[in-house]
Image (cartoon, helix red, strand yellow):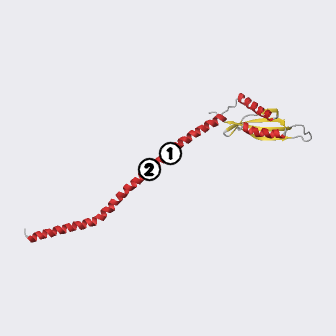
Amino acid sequence: MSRSDRKGRLSLRRVDALAAGVCLAAALPLCFASVNPLLRSGDDASQRKAQLATLRRQAGRADRSLVAQRKRLEALRAEVDKHTSRSLSAGNLNRRIAKLTELAVTTGLEVDEILPGVPARTGRARTVPVKLTASGSYPTCVVFLANLSKAFPDTSVGSFELTGYPQHPARPAKLQVDLRWHLAAAPEPQK
């Protein structure tokens, strides 16, 4: 091989190396442009994993809160059932009338009569009307009505009438109260 052939081959090698370098320099930004989103997608995946972990913790807290609220609801329902699941038996009605009479007498009223009415279904509950007729002073009647709401929270006053006798101040006032005793509704009969 002659020297000129060697020089030609060396210069061709230099040209080839230079061309490879130029190609590499031109392709390098393209490689970074295509690799950069891959690097960013790795960051996005890390962020999404962190968000998923946060959401899972929040879901766990929500589940625990839901379980606690359901337990609380069941406890409240049991408490309501305990207070409102009284059946309307003759014994319960007689006990109610006896307690109502005792309240009126201890307040200072003289009970003339207590008449239970026919139970009626009203929406989600049953009500038993009870008519109370008694006599006593005006302050005694007021105290009785105040004590009634405390002693019987499941009983409301439908109406009341207080009649005084100004011509006869020694004569006690007459009190007539229409009460509504509210009970839990009996289950509907199945057809």
Give the quadrant of residue 102: top right
Give the quadrant of residue 124: top right
Residue closest to the far left: 1
From the viewer's perspective, tell me whether residue 92 is left or right of residue 111.
left
Q: Is residue 159 visible?
A: yes
Q: Is residue 84 visible?
A: no
Location of the C terminus (image quadrant): top right
Q: Residue 175 location, x and y as percent?
A: 82, 38
For the residue labelled by badge 1, is the local secondary structure a helix, a strand or a loop?
Answer: helix
- Give the labeled residue for mark 2: 52
41 vs 5: above or below: above
For the residue labelled by badge 2, is the local secondary structure a helix, a strand or a loop?
Answer: helix
At horizontal 37% and vertical 56% (from top left) the residue drawn is 41
- Give the labeled residue for mark 1: 61
At horizontal 47% and vertical 49% (from top left) the residue drawn is 55
Q: What's the amino acid at mark 1?
A: Arg
User: Dot 2: few (<14), some (14–19), or many (≥20) neighbours within 10 Å?
Assistant: few
